[in-house]
Amino acid sequence: VEEVDLTQSLAEVLENILEPHGLLIQRDLMREAGVILERRSVRALGQGRIVELGWPGEGRPDGPVIEVTAQRPARRAEPWTVQADGWLVESTFTLAGGWDPSLEGQPDNAYSKTSNPQFADYANVYRLWVLNEDGAFSASPYNRGGPFDLTGFFGQRAIRPQPLRFLPCLTLDDGGSRRSPIVEMSLDHGLSWSVYPGSLRLLTDRAGVYFDDSNLPGSFLTAAKLGMARVRVTAGLQSPLPVSVTRWTGNPFQGTGRGRLFDLGGALTFAEVAPESIHYDQVQAGALSALEANDTHRLHDWLVRRLNQTAEAHDDKVGRARLRLAGPWPLLRVGDRLINAAGDGTDAAGQPEAIVSEGAIVRAIRCTWAEETFPWDWQPKPTVHRPPLTELELMF
């Protein structure tokens, strides 16, 4: 399935439909009676050989290019970007209390849903545990320290603090399904851990958990009131930034354009189990399986293919040029695509590697082999001996 952008012109929409079937609309420009006419025909993609012209100083024979004259400028350089959903990382996260510390230290029944009619005043105490990825619990009255470092965790460029949510683990259970988030508690400052035995729910508006028991487990409440309780969650966390690849196409000497963005969503996978996960060692040892993948190369290949398809389909309608080569070039054929024919916008040769090389299609070839004698008209002219040369008409 190929996406079709219906905001484009009808001609561009038709071309995008033809591309997946290996076809393109070839446009030939002609001048008749001072008017530029355009003739269109459908032909197959990939016709013509790739021919590279050498230049002096590149370890090749002396460069044959004498002159390049472009009749119309090549299209401007544009950044093309393809992106997919951000990295999904499984880890084990130690949480912070999501309540006002001044509400701690009350009698046990103050934290009971069933025995305290004013429970709403204490509803979050010892029950709400958060990652604090957006920094909402950093300031007074919570004072839980700085926000969780999303930039360091995902290893991406700066990610602003923002609410996320816990997702299922990447590690699989015995049935081959992703494990649900695992919530554990510690009663001894994090020295030992056990699965939380009561009722709980994962938050949907941020990364956190809420203990929803009518009465908190006695041992946990006692440890919490003494400041010894800890809570951690093993789950997946997805980066809010997409994974993206950008490459440039076109001729930078003609200026730059706005570019295009393609979003593949979840079509590709970027997922890993972090060393901090309680499952990491077993996954590394092969005792457990996990849905880890890094499709960066596939993302890159997708963009390159799209750029090449577009270049093949559209380059031959951008402009015309004439290229003069020293000597005869009898092996060149109409339909060949020249690369490295640098000069006046016939391609992007000599630019950074991110620039996709765009060739020029040979439309006509004219060779001058022999001497040229001027006609005798109003005064005699000598015979002029010209070196052999080849003149190419290009469409790029």
Image (cartoon, rainbow, N blue to C red):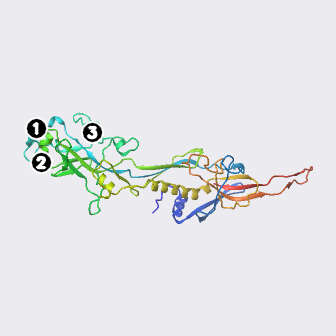
Numbered label attached to residue 217: 2
User: Badge 3: how crowded within 10 Å, few (<14), some, or many (20+)?
Assistant: some
The amino acid pointed to by label 2 is Pro
Q: Are marks 3 and 2 in contact (CB under 8 Å)?
A: no
370 to 93, vertically: above or below: below
User: Badge 1: how crowded within 10 Å, few (<14), some, or many (20+)?
Assistant: few
The amino acid pointed to by label 1 is Gln
Residue beneath label 1, please?
106
Left or right of 77: which side holds 366? right
Label 1 – label 2 distance at C-alpha: 16 Å
Left or right of 392: which side holds 372? right
Residue 332: where, in percent of width, then height? 70, 60
Residue in front for this viewpoint, 289 or 214: 289
The amino acid pointed to by label 3 is Ala
Residue 186: where, in percent of width, then height? 18, 45
Label 3 – label 2 distance at C-alpha: 27 Å
Q: Quadrant of residue 126?
A: top left
Question: Can see residue 55?
Answer: yes
93 to 338, vertically: above or below: above
Q: Are marks 1 and 2 in contact (CB under 8 Å)?
A: no
**Label 2's element?**
loop
Residue beneath label 3, please?
136
* Tally of numbered tags: 3
Residue 308: where, in percent of width, then height? 55, 56
Give me the residue at 14% from left, 45% from top: 220
Residue in front for this viewpoint, 158 or 261: 158
Give me the residue at 47% from left, 61% from top: 2
Query: Which quarter of the image is occupied by the N terminus?
Result: bottom left
Q: Which of labels 1 and 2 is toward the front? A: 2
Label 1 – label 3 distance at C-alpha: 25 Å
